[in-house]
Image (cartoon, rainbow, N blue to C red):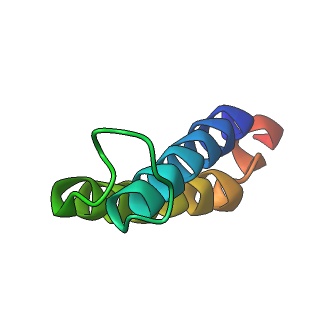
Amino acid sequence: MRSLFVAFGVIALLIGVVWTLQGADVLLGSFMSGSPVWLSAGVVLVVLGAAVVALGARTSGAKKAA
């Protein structure tokens, strides 16, 4: 379960970075380029992805020992 959280978090982080760069008009060639909506959505997704990665990394396997 722990690795699943980390994997989903990393995927969300990567997608969020791409959306942020497209919204900031750094990555060109898409309808999302230069759009503040995608910039905001990307930043939110980066923050959520980082939180999920942190949650997955903090989750311990102590319950298995009990």
| Residue 11, quarter of the rendered image | top right
Q: Which of the image's four quarters has the C terminus?
A: top right
Q: Residue at x 28, y 39 (%)?
A: 31
Q: Residue at x 46, y 51 (%)?
A: 28
Q: Residue at x 26, y 53 (%)?
A: 38
- Image position of 41 (left or right of 65): left
Task: Answer above or below: position of 65 versus 33.
Answer: above
- Image position of 28 (left or right of 61): left
Q: Residue at x 70, y 58 (%)?
A: 57
Percent position of residue 8, x then y: 57, 37
Q: Which of the image's four quarters has the N terminus?
A: top right
Percent position of residue 41, x then y: 26, 55
- Image position of 49 (left or right of 63): left
Note whether residue 48 is visible.
no
- Image position of 18 (left or right of 20): right
Percent position of residue 62, x then y: 75, 50
Percent position of residue 37, x then y: 17, 56
| Residue 46, quarter of the rendered image | bottom left
The one nearer the camera, 15 or 29, is: 29
Residue sitting at the far front: 29
Task: Answer above or below: position of 29 versus 51.
Answer: above
- Give the total number of marks visible in the rendering: 0
Note whether residue 59 is visible.
yes
| Residue 42, quarter of the rendered image | bottom left
